[in-house]
Image (spheres, coloured by chain):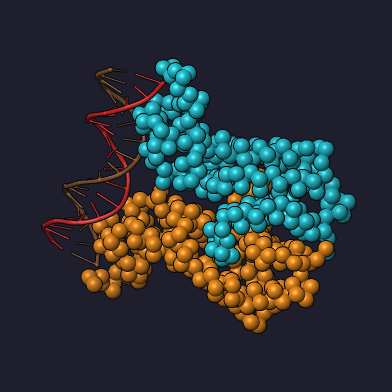
Chain colours: A orange, B cyan, C red, D brown
Amino acid sequence: MTREKGKNQLDTTTEARIKQAARVVFHKKGYAATRTRDIAEEAGINLALLNYYFRSKEKLFEQIMLETMFGFMKTMVVIFNDASTTLEQKVSHMANNYIDLILLEPEIPLFILSEIRRDATAFVERMPVEELFLNSVFIQQYKAAVSAGRVAESNPLHFLMNLMGLVIFPFIASPFYKKIGKLSETQFNGLMEERKSLVPVWINAILKPT
Amino acid sequence: MTREKGKNQLDTTTEARIKQAARVVFHKKGYAATRTRDIAEEAGINLALLNYYFRSKEKLFEQIMLETMFGFMKTMVVIFNDASTTLEQKVSHMANNYIDLILLEPEIPLFILSEIRRDATAFVERMPVEELFLNSVFIQQYKAAVSAGRVAESNPLHFLMNLMGLVIFPFIASPFYKKIGKLSETQFNGLMEERKSLVPVWINAILKPT
DNA sequence: GTCTATAGGGGGATAGAC
DNA sequence: GTCTATCCCCCTATAGAC
């Protein structure tokens, strides 16, 4: 550790700064379009250091990808396994938390989806499916609601697709909507804020039997 | 034209075969991850021919991208500007046509979205926004329905986000849902078929005032 | 029009000084 | 730990024979 305290280098380690830079660049451009030189520049360090700390672009990427994926899904796992909330509350929490989360880092959903396409098996295999879905409190509540006739019968996967589609898709396709609606970044974000309360209402309407 | 009729080379021109191969490879891997050698191999021709016909990877890509984008949106333009259908019928047509379309070429949505992210301005700028949305029959009908109190007041962009989110998102995130639901390709496609009739019902439920 | 061979450059990775 | 310099492969693009 050569660094003197007086220099006050944002008090993060070099390794952490490289990782953070890699996060930013990978998220924005994806694996294939990212050059290790981009990351080095973003981190304000030399290219050789990247290999010193992380061995290779591939290894660095894998760390970022896994952390991003699990970080993103962790929210879902927590919400879906909270025994103290109802189905309706879970929907509301999902909408609120994910819209906030994506407003902070809008590149994440498309990043994850694109990279899973590139190498589906490698990453999807590591997902905690049981915990996330099959054995979750959410699934129990959903099935109970169907049995009780409180919601229309339909595959819980449809429910999940609907929820995620309503929450995530607008962000993924945002250039399209900004163009079509002649919206600034701020205006677009405003619409997303609105959806925090709208999505739960809509999901509720969908669930009600006709 | 050296080719003899007896050879019967799938009776397509070399240029068309290269283009078709480029479509396949670009759609699957995206611009950055695609090597011109992949395309040449897929087309069953030599790499030099690609440059002979299309000058460069970039130029070839631009053709594919524009054709794919406009091909995909054309369906929407037609449906949204059909004066002989109601709002409800338009939703049903959208769901049916797009689910069929994406079942045939599942890579298209993520391809378009990924490449727009890579170079947003270049492609999004060329979209026929007025025709597609602002001056469309759909918008007129939507506004009329709001005025008449037939649907709950909300930005038509929300409506469009909902519709596209419900239809397109499940395909984009399909590896995720296949894993979570332990679904085969066929089973997943079956779910998508179901959504052809479910999405219109759901959109209708969303539109109804509470 | 189609091929082989190769030029030319970019990008990942490492050697070695400090 | 951090840098500069450099290696070397891979990929795009072109020259030139047929």
Q: Position of residue B178 (x, y in %)?
A: 56, 60
Residue B207 x, y percent position in the rendering: 79, 57
State the residue in front, C3 or A97.
C3
Outermost residue, right side: B148
Q: Which residue is rendered at x = 82% and y = 41% of the image?
A: B85
User: Which image quarter: residue B14?
Assistant: top left
A20 relative to B16, above or below = below
In this view, the residue in front, B186 or B80, is B186
Relative image position of residue C2 (x, y in whole percent)? 37, 25
Question: Residue lying furthest bottom in this view?
Answer: A84
| A180 vs C18: above or below | above
Residue A154 on image: x %, y %: 72, 65
Q: Residue at x 47, y 36 (%)?
A: B21
User: Can residue A192 be seen?
Assistant: no
Q: Classify the position of the N terminus of chain A by image quarter.
A: bottom left
User: Is residue B35 shown above or below B16?
Assistant: below
Residue B29 shows up from this direction: yes
> Is the residue B106 above or below the residue B188 in the image?
above
In front of the other: A188 or A134: A134
Q: Which residue appears at 51% of the width and 71% of the height?
A: A128
